[in-house]
Amino acid sequence: MSSPTGPASGLPVRMPRPRQPGRHRRPEPLAAPEGAPALVLAVPGTPAAATRSLAEEVVSIARSELPGLDARIGYLDGDDSEFPTLQAVLTHAAEERSARYEQAKAAGMDVKEPDGPVAVVVPLLAGPDSALLRRIRQAVMDSRIAADLTDVLGPHPLLAEALHVRLSEAGLARADRARLFAVTTAADGIILGAVGGEEAVQAAGITGMLLAARLAVPVMAAALDQDGSIASIADQLRSSGSQQLALAPYLIGPEIDPAVIEEAAKEAGCSAAEPLGPYPAIGKLVLAKYTTALGIAPQQAQGAPVR
């Protein structure tokens, strides 16, 4: 017989922990859905150790956001040895899925033959580049593997944040507008250098507006891969009153030879920040493209309630 304060025997009772109400509840642990397609990061540019390190860090960020995620890297110009091509990675993912099914079937497990896409291919591109996207699409088609291809990562507010951080790291912008001290090398005009022609410049302009709101200075997009584009925008900024310019590369890094950025900065007569690189937001945006393609929200990955 129990008393109001415990059992009559005096044995301890494990009481349930009180549930935290509303938005203060501890979030449910997330994990990739069982049997979910692989996330394949399509990396452009000439493969190199630095490119591989960047891609691996981006994939690591995505995995940390969604444990259990099968994330792989395929290089558009790979050699199928040290740098596996996108086509080879897709083929290998399909072979592994078929092998898992056959093993489960041989073990007497009641399993359904896998259907749906084998992989979701996410281009490692901040903005649209029709030439590179055409090659990625062709590689997916040549693999003859069922795979979904997502859009590029931008435009997005997180990319504006990443650009701000890269500029501040180079001493070309305040870390945040709340700081009272001045950065003597801070630019009063930003050239956003995109790759991919006019379409890329227009898309970069959207992120540029977000960056301008963060920095409270004019931001104009130009094409790094078009002769005269950077110099023309530099002239426009100076004619409108900006005296100290900065070049912010609106790209991840592998898309273009770093020497092109250096030459563009010289052409504009200004300093340049580093490319976006493996900034944490890049990995999060890659994962967001993956989950959107599957029609799931990150909070729903393991059945967690959406609030």
Image (cartoon, grey):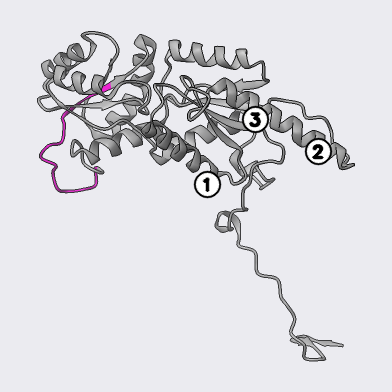
Residue 304 percent location from the top left of the image:
66, 48
- The answer to the question of whether label 3 and label 1 lie on touching residues, with beta carbons closer than 8 A, is no
Q: Which residues are magenta?
A: 177-192
Label 3 to label 1: alpha-carbon separation = 19 Å
Q: Is residue 219 visible?
A: no
Q: Which residue is mark 1?
A: 64
Residue 288 percent location from the top left of the image:
54, 34
For residue 97, side relative to residue 275 (left or right):
right
Q: Secondary structure at mark 2?
A: helix
Label 3 to label 2: alpha-carbon separation = 26 Å
Marked residue nearer the N-terminal end (3 or 2): 2
Q: Nearer the viewer, residue 304 or 64?
A: 64
Q: Secondary structure at mark 1?
A: helix
Marked residue nearer the N-terminal end (2 or 1): 1
Tag 1: Cα neighbours inside 10 Å, few (<14), some, or many (≥20)? some
Residue 161 percent location from the top left of the image:
35, 36
Give the residue type that dot 3 points to: Leu
Q: Nearer the viewer, residue 82 or 170?
A: 82
- The answer to the question of whether label 3 and label 2 lie on touching residues, with beta carbons closer than 8 A, is no
- The answer to the question of whether label 2 and label 1 lie on touching residues, with beta carbons closer than 8 A, is no
Q: Quadrant of residue 182?
A: top left
Give the residue type that dot 2 points to: Gln
Residue 294 image label: 3
Label 2 to label 1: alpha-carbon separation = 29 Å
Q: Secondary structure at mark 3?
A: helix
> Does 228 appear in magenta?
no
Q: Quadrant of residue 147?
A: top right
Quadrant where the N terminus lies? bottom right
Q: Nearer the viewer, residue 136 or 204?
A: 136
Of badges 3 and 2, the one in the foreground is 2
Q: Which residue is mark 2?
A: 103
